[in-house]
Amino acid sequence: MKISALSLGLLAAAANAQYFSEGWAPGKAVPTVDTPPTHPTSIPQKQAAPAERLTPAKIASWFDLATLLQSAPAVSVFERFGINITERLEGAVQAAKIWDDRVTLITDHNYQDVIVNEPLTEQEEQDRTWILVISATAGRQDGISKYVDDMSDSAYNQTVIAGDLPNVRWGRVDYFNVTGITTKWAVWQAPFLVILRHRGQDLRFYRPHQIRINDFALRAFLQHEDWKLTPPWTGIYAPGGDREWIMEYLAVVLTKLYDTAILFPRWLLFIISGGIASFLINFLHKPSAAAASAPAQQHTTTPTAVTEASSNATATASRTVPAKRKKATKGK
């Protein structure tokens, strides 16, 4: 028992000895105490994905006819009649597809992020060239605009296969769904080809009749950098001009108006525009005060004239009746 008690005491002393230090001595570094984490067993949380930016075009898409037809109540109603409305809509969308989706669609809301603030090195910024097609095909049946779109898409496809234009980026601007960009650039018609450089500070505009529009010629135009033969747009309203702020202010105002207008469905805009047009037509064709008082005077004088005419006719009849009686008496 004594041996066991002694051994237990030695073990306890050895166990306690490891928790004692010799202390701090001059010349030694000051010991630091590591603070344990507050929640050592906590699991790191993943950062939530940033919320998708809500744009007027996205809000307007909620009231789009295709979106309403793809809703669950509409799909169930059509299924009762044996119609797969989702498949029909997908087929209609594919049939109405007019552009190559691989080409970047430039809008008022992504222009700054895609082109102006594109992350580039200094050398890449000097070499970067954007070719943009301002197209009107989506809004109207324009043969020239459709041809320019087809040739641009074909040239883009050949460039992707060849890989010989690494510094060139392709984009498209829908003329009827963009307001700020076209206003700032003073573009009032389509189609146009635009060579954009230096983050939008150097702009060159080409109409279809000014250059050869086919896929091979367009690629050669970019490979040989023939656009350098054309001076960039300069003037007081051009980028860097003295009155550039006027075009920017006008672009902001018109973009705000457009973003507000597209929040309403088209059928509602037709009703509102029809009501406004009817009101304006009635207001412009409203008779003047003098013309409106003339018929009123005629209506007020007509009963008097009729009364006078009837009294005159009665007096004449009363005169003729005694005359006839006198003639009849003389004849007897």
Image (tube, rainbow, N blue to C red):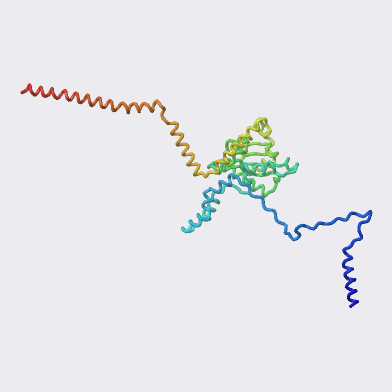
Q: Residue 222's image quarter? A: top right
Rendering coords of residue 47 (x, y %): 69, 53
Rendering coords of residue 63 (x, y %): 53, 48
Q: Residue 249's image quarter? A: top right
Q: Is residue 8 rendered to the left or right of residue 275?
A: right
Q: Residue 254's image quarter? A: top right
Asked if one can make out residue 198 in the rendered structure from this viewpoint, the answer is yes
Tell which residue pokes out farthest to the left in this image.
Answer: 332
Q: Is residue 300 rendered to the left or right of residue 21?
A: left
Q: Is residue 34 above or below residue 204?
A: below
Q: Is residue 276 rendered to the left or right of residue 104?
A: left
* Residue occupying image coordinates x 65% and y 36%: 204
Q: Quadrant of the N terminus?
A: bottom right
* Residue occupying image coordinates x 7% and y 23%: 329
Rendering coords of residue 202 (x, y %): 68, 36
Rendering coords of residue 87 (x, y %): 53, 55
User: Which is nearer the eye, 19 or 153?
Assistant: 19
User: Which is nearer the eye, 181 or 95?
Assistant: 181
User: Which is nearer the eye, 87 or 228?
Assistant: 87
Asked if one can make out residue 214 in the rendered structure from this viewpoint, the answer is no
* Residue occupying image coordinates x 67% and y 34%: 239
